Amino acid sequence: MVHDESKLIAPTARQGFIDTAGQEWLQVQAIGGATLQVGNVKIPLTDVLYVPNLSKNLLSIQVLTTDGACIIFEESGATILQHDGSMVKSKTNLHKKRWEVYSDSLAAQLNDPLEGIDAITTPARPTSHTMSKL
């Protein structure tokens, strides 16, 4: 989800609402593609929602894992491994208690998609211990 419609590629009008973790309903105004630029790696994203009242752009863990990505959460940050071989390493912002991806975050294109990840591993759900940290 993005808060700036100019970040969308080929936006299409879309009406609806999203429910936030803070129990707020925010209006969706468009949907389109986008590119996540991390360092010199560009990662294409599909079905990105334009939600003008968001304060930050957001990545949906549920959508990423449904689309085949593997997310590894660690104390220092989170690693997103996509089925196309792209990888993004985020950093933990301890002050705000969230994982953040910046343009200077580590990103790479792996030679072997999901290299080092067991193909039969099912993406894990956050534990209550992890949720309590958020």
Image (spheres, helix red, strand yellow):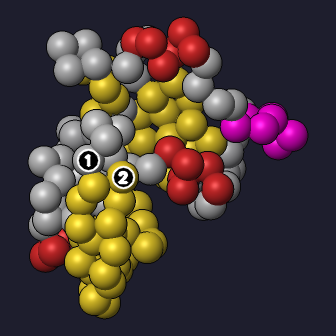
The quadrant of the picture occupied by the N terminus is bottom left
Residue at 65 percent across and 31 percent down: it is 125
Question: What residue lies at 31% left-to-right and 26% top-to-bottom?
Answer: 98
- Considering only vertical position in the picture, is 102 above or below 13? above
Q: Amino acid at mark 1?
A: Glu
> Is-magenta flag for residue 121?
yes
User: Total number of numbered labels?
Assistant: 2
- Residue labelled with disc 1: 24
At 67% from the left edge and 45% from the top edge, which residue is drawn?
114
In the rendered image of this protein, does residue 71 appear above or below residue 110? above
Looking at the picture, how far across and down is residue 51, in whole percent? 22, 65
- Is 55 left or right of 107, judged from the image as shown? left
Disc 2 and disc 1 in contact, CB within 8 angstroms: yes
Mark 2: amino acid: Asp
Residues shaded magenta: 117-123
Say whether residue 133 is left or right of residue 123: left
